[in-house]
Image: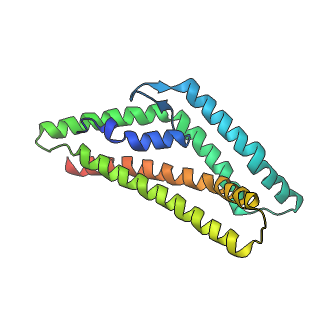
Amino acid sequence: MTETLERALAPLITIGSFCDLGMFEHPVGQPRPYLSCLYVLAKWSFFTYFCYYPIFINDLWDKKTYIVDFVPLITITLVLISFCRFKELKMCLRELDIVDDTLEALGMPKEYQRLRNWIIRMIIGWILYIFADLAYHSLYIIIFIPFSDILFFFYLMDYSFITHYPVYVITINVLISGTILGLVHVYTFTL
């Protein structure tokens, strides 16, 4: 049974920390800032230098600018903002927990297990979205791009995942924000 709001939101926060939207917390409540900073720096340095930078250079060489080219820049900005605001997110969750304790004292039951199950369903839906997107791109590659080497196919699949990774990060950020705003909405209209 889930006893606290922070434990109910733990799966979503953990997935968000792997997508660089917060700090790693191995025992819940104990952030690991050095490990998190190193992980974010290594991951986004690799993505930027080996993946996004060649795309930007190619587009600048061709004197073209696409809206899709701004998505990695927006995502890096989002990661930095989320990383800096992680402490405020934890404070917000503690305040929501206090409001929930007050509502329980007034007679409203806590439904953390239901919230946790809902969050797990959202995470499963997010993972299915990623797999469906990758399946779509793999079918596109198989049908429209002639290739003779299986390694080239895996290279294109990896390239497809890396170029769409910022969209997946933005999606999980929207899920985290929507969940917390939904909780605030529920607590606001039950008082």
x then y, percent, for residue 32: 51, 25
Of all residues, the one furthest to the bottom in this rendering is 143
x then y, percent, for residue 176: 43, 47
* Rendered residue at 64%/50% (across/down): 74
Of all residues, the one furthest to the left in this rendering is 107
Residue 94 seen in the current view: yes
* Rendered residue at 25%/49% (across/down): 114
* Rendered residue at 67%/34% (across/down): 42
Q: Quadrant of residue 48?
A: top right
Residue 21 seen in the current view: no
Lateral position of residue 60 relative to residue 107, left or right:
right
Lateral position of residue 190 relative to residue 47, left or right:
left
x then y, percent, for residue 178: 41, 52
In front here: 39 or 70? 39
In front here: 150 or 83? 150
Q: Quadrant of residue 45?
A: top right
128 versus 33 height, above or below: below
Of all residues, the one furthest to the front in this rendering is 149
Lateral position of residue 19 relative to residue 90, left or right:
right
165 versus 79 height, above or below: below
**In the rendered view, how is the structure colored?**
rainbow
x then y, percent, for residue 130: 53, 58
Q: How many marks?
A: 0
In front here: 143 or 71? 143
171 versus 17 height, above or below: below
- Quadrant including the N terminus: top left
* Rendered residue at 48%/34% (across/down): 86
Lateral position of residue 97 relative to residue 138, left or right:
left
